[in-house]
Image (spheres, rainbow, N blue to C red):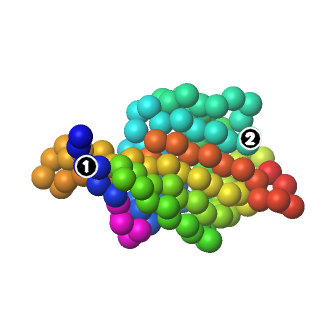
Amino acid sequence: MTTQTEPSRDEVLAAASEIVDAFAATDGDRYFATFAPDATFVFHTEPERLADRAAYERLWAGWVADGWRVVSCTSTDRLVQPFPGGAVFTHSVETTAETGDGPETYRERETIVFRVDPATDAAGPRLVAVHEHLSPLPGTAA
């Protein structure tokens, strides 16, 4: 049996910050590079689960084509739960986006599940997101 690496809290926080920073910059290439091709996504704003990264990339492209872009994104109340082979990261996130209809602000809880991917180069193993789930914070409008 192979021993699985358990990521440190700092490694998970760095991987999560990479996702938040890329999202805040509306940098789709950098953002989607943090997710595995087989990652799944559950967003309270969408009627169905997105079954892979490509499905989310298509949705994102439609948003951007309609004038959507992130103005700000703030992560608070961060919790890291590492386990052998990965980690669960949860936080509260406030996002303001410019849309074709004007600005919108969302206050949500987010869960990101990471797995440790084996080294593909000299950099060694890296954390890659395999699932993202967003839900509205209680008492806030979506």
Q: Which mark is in front, 2 or 1?
A: 1
In the picture as drawn, the residue positioned furthest to the left comes out as 122
| Residue 29 image offset from top left, x and y in percent | 41, 44
129 vs 66, left or right, is left
| Residues drawn in magenta | 7-11
Q: Determine crowd level at label 2: few under 14, some 14-19, many 20+ residues with C-alpha closer than 10 A.
A: few
Q: Is residue 77 above or below residue 4?
A: below
What residue sits 44% from the left and 60% below the top?
82
Question: For the N terminus, which image quadrant?
Answer: top left
What residue sits 42% from the left and 55% below the top?
83
- Inspect this view and state whether residue 117 appears: yes
137 vs 24, left or right, is right
122 vs 115, left or right, is left
Amino acid residing under circle 1: Thr
| Residue 96 image offset from top left, x and y in percent | 68, 60
The residue beneath circle 2 is: 45
| Residue 4 image offset from top left, x and y in percent | 29, 49
Classified by dominant secondary structure, the portion drawn in magenta counts as: helix
Q: What element carries label 2?
A: loop
- Residue 10: within the magenta? yes
Amino acid residing under circle 2: Thr
The residue beneath circle 1 is: 3
What residue sits 66% from the left and 49% below the top?
134
